[in-house]
Structure formats: structure tokens, C-alpha cells
Image (cartoon, rainbow, N blue to C red):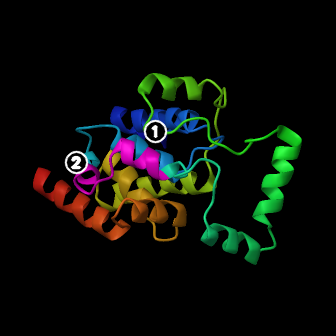
Amino acid sequence: MFERFTKEARTVVVLAQEEARMLNHSWIGSEHLLLGIASRAGAPGAATLERLGVTPAACRAAMVPASAGELDEQDAAALSAIGIDLDAVRDRAEEVFGPGALDHAATPEQSRGRWRKAAKGAPKGHIPFTPRAKKVLERSLREALARKDNFIGTQHVLLGILDPADHPTAALLARLGTDMEAVRAGLLAELEQAA
């Protein structure tokens, strides 16, 4: 399937991995692919994302907790509903790994240099795709076929990301003040205008 990816779409996948590293994530999810597309100014779909406020800096900020290491009451209640005591988890992590063990190393608002320093502790080597991200790549092929394109470009990857069942990406877009329907409509209008 990757042989059908355009150079730009392949670059987005590489950027997704780099962004996951900088965020100290040990996985590549659909949200990282979205961040990769947003980072490629001029790529199909990137202008739509920017117009809707989905910029690289905004994505990173929305992907990092507002106050490092702290979850809000809604998070604690959701975890409690499935039997997880957030305070007990935090206490145990600090007991084993030391005070502040759950604090995030850096935030996107910090300078690029400090952001890169935070990435030094990031995962090394291959970072695996989550099942969600794999489905995005599969859906991108289906989107290309549906549009009768013989290649998979960034626009197809973005369409593949816009699955209502992808709750983490839907939540990320909501934190950025938009939703999947607005992104899809904007992207389709962008593609129609370019044709």
C-alpha cells in the first residue's frame, strides 16, 4: 500500500513519528498523523486545517495536558467509573519513580530548543502505529479508490482520519474548536476548488 503514497503523504507519516517522539509518546496515533498533515503547509488539506485553527502549535498544545501531570475532575470521574483511583495511581507512581513522575517534560509553548531537549528522553527506534492509525492508513486507500485516484495523498490520509469512531481525534478537534464534519466539508471544498 505504501508504494501508492505520494512523497508528501510519506513525509506526513515520518512527521507523525517525529511528533510522537517529541511528545514523548511510545505510539503513533491518528492524532499524530493529523499533526503531521497540519505541519505540511501547502499539502492538500493543510490549508483547511489551518483555516479551522488546527495548526501544529495548537495541536501540540491540545495534545499535552494544560497543567502537566494533572487531570481534571471529569477525568478522575471517568477513570473511577472503571475502577481506577487516579489519586492512588499518582501516589504509587511517585512512590516508585519519585516525586513528579507523571509531570510532562516540556510543553509546546516552550522554545523550539527546549522542545527538542525534551525529545531527548523520547522513545528511540521504531515507534509502532496504534490500531487506530493503521485503520486511518487503510481508510486512506479506500478514500483514494472512492475518489478514483491512483495515488494516496495527504488529502486521502486526512479523509481517513475523519472517522467518527476515532474518539481521541474527535476530542482533539473539539479542543481546537472544530469537528470532523467541518474538516471534511472544508477539505472537500478545497479539493473541488483545486480541480
Above or below residue 52? Residue 57 is above
Quarter of the view holding residue 75? bottom right
- Residue span colored magenta: 47-62
From the image, tell me which residue sits under label 2.
47
Q: At which x and y percent is residue 78?
A: 67, 73
| Image quarter of residue 26 | top right
Which comes sooner in the sequence, label 2 or label 1? 2
Instruction: Name the amino acid type tagged 2.
Output: Ala
Which residue does the image show at 46% across and 71% down from the upper left? 164
- For disc 1, the marked residue is 108
In the image, 103 versus 184, the foreground residue is 103
- The answer to whether residue 82 is above or below residue 168 is below
Q: Is residue 175 above or below residue 153?
A: below
Name the one closer to the observer, 150 or 158.
158
Q: Position of residue 151 (x, y in %)?
A: 34, 44
Whether residue 141 is visible to the viewer of this picture, yes or no, is yes
Circle number at residue 116: none
